Amino acid sequence: MGDAQRLSPEEQLRYAREQFETGSDLSVAVEEEFAILDPETLELSNRFEDMQAAALGTEVEEHLVGELIASEVEVRTGRCETFAEAYALMGERRAQLRAIAAQVDVGLSSCGTHPWSRWQDQRIIDTPHYHRNDEILGYVVWRNNTFGLHVHIGINGPDRAIAVNDALRNFLPELLALSASSPFVEGVNTRLHSARTEIFTRMFPRCGIPDPYGDWQTFEDYVRFLYDTKSIDEHTQLWWSVRPHLAFPTVEIRIMDAQPELGESRSLAALAYSLAARVARAVDEGEPLPSWPRRLLEENFWRATRYGLSGELLDLERGVPVPARARLEQLVEWVQPVAEELGAAQWLAVPDRNGAERQIARHEEGASLEEIFVEQVRAGERVRG
């Protein structure tokens, strides 16, 4: 990725097209973002550089990266040829990360937001990339103390990658509803199930649900337009919730909240991977796929942000609301045959309660935000299984 980022815009676009033309199909990589915590107070703690230094020379060194603020760390599986490999590596990476955290005496959590730490107390990490985003975005980037789960799926063929990307737009609300884990931020119950989504996708430019592109040339023309008009100066400034990646031949799904529990993180990654594979199969076989306008998808996007799995999503074919859980169960059923072929089906599940629902239920029982957060941190300490 480093070499790709040093290319000129035209070189970058040519490189990306070539990578998609030759890239392998249905590889997978998973990225998980974690909050770094003071072990006593559980406040966000600006200790990323300490963790990075402690990782030098270890197996996790090349897979541990900074992500905007010094109280955040990201760990990556790296490219995997099968989901079973990614499944195993997600557990290994969490265990490796926790070993580093213990070495430097910090805690970790993996919810979409921290429930009370102030964004004003967080420091941007010292890299040219993030200093540039700080300079361009100011308050927008300062405020983004959020934590997500990203899944990269290898797709062979530039136009085919765009077709998969375009179709996945239609399923982003379902993935968001399933993943919601961030009802609390800035010391309040926001009444949202995913406060992370409201903070990130509503503040950043070029974020949330993109328009469909139709083909690679249209996507390339759009990116070139952004460069030519100085709207962006590097390709990572396209923050859409699903995007063709310009450094790797992957479609990246970026809509999901981070997950406190390893099992739910794995299940969510399995669904995202299986969904992309099922969409690719439909593209190959000429099966009709939805292509709803952004204004309609936004209705479901809001419902998923506000109510998560507890609410309703709109069946846009029939124009009626349906329980979000029922919609997710339908989606799992739709992807199941392809998931079985790829060895991912056993990890597909719609939980009785997702992260947000569990936290909200505890709050309604009278538990404090501090007590609830302790429970999430402890749930994340179970890194095997």
Image (spheres, rainbow, N blue to C red):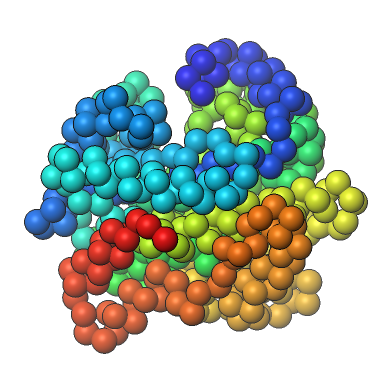
Residue occupying image coordinates x 47% and y 40%:
77
- Residue 159 makes an appearance in the image: yes
Q: Pick the residue in front: 269 or 355.
A: 269
Q: Please provide percent x and percent y for residue 321.
A: 66, 80
Q: Please provide percent x and percent y for residue 144.
A: 34, 46
Q: Please provide percent x and percent y for residue 195.
A: 39, 62
Pick out the residue farthest to the bottom. 365
Pick out the residue farthest to the left. 40
* Left or right: 187 in relation to 68: left
Q: Looking at the image, is 144 positioned above or below residue 58?
A: below
Residue occupying image coordinates x 74% and y 25%:
22
* Left or right: 156 in relation to 87: right
Q: Looking at the image, is 215 positioned above or below residue 270?
A: above
- Residue 206 makes an appearance in the image: no
**In the picture, residue 247 is in which quadrant?**
top right
Q: Please provide percent x and percent y for residue 33.
A: 38, 46
Quarter holding the C terminus is bottom left
Q: Pick the residue in front: 74 or 169.
A: 74
Task: Count how many numbered circles sit on residues in the image.
Answer: 0
* Left or right: 72 in relation to 7: left
* Left or right: 288 in relation to 320: right
Residue occupying image coordinates x 20% and y 55%:
117
Residue occupying image coordinates x 82% and y 53%:
282
**In the picture, residue 260 is in which quadrant?**
bottom left
Pick out the residue farthest to the right. 286
Q: Pick the residue in front: 85 or 303.
A: 85
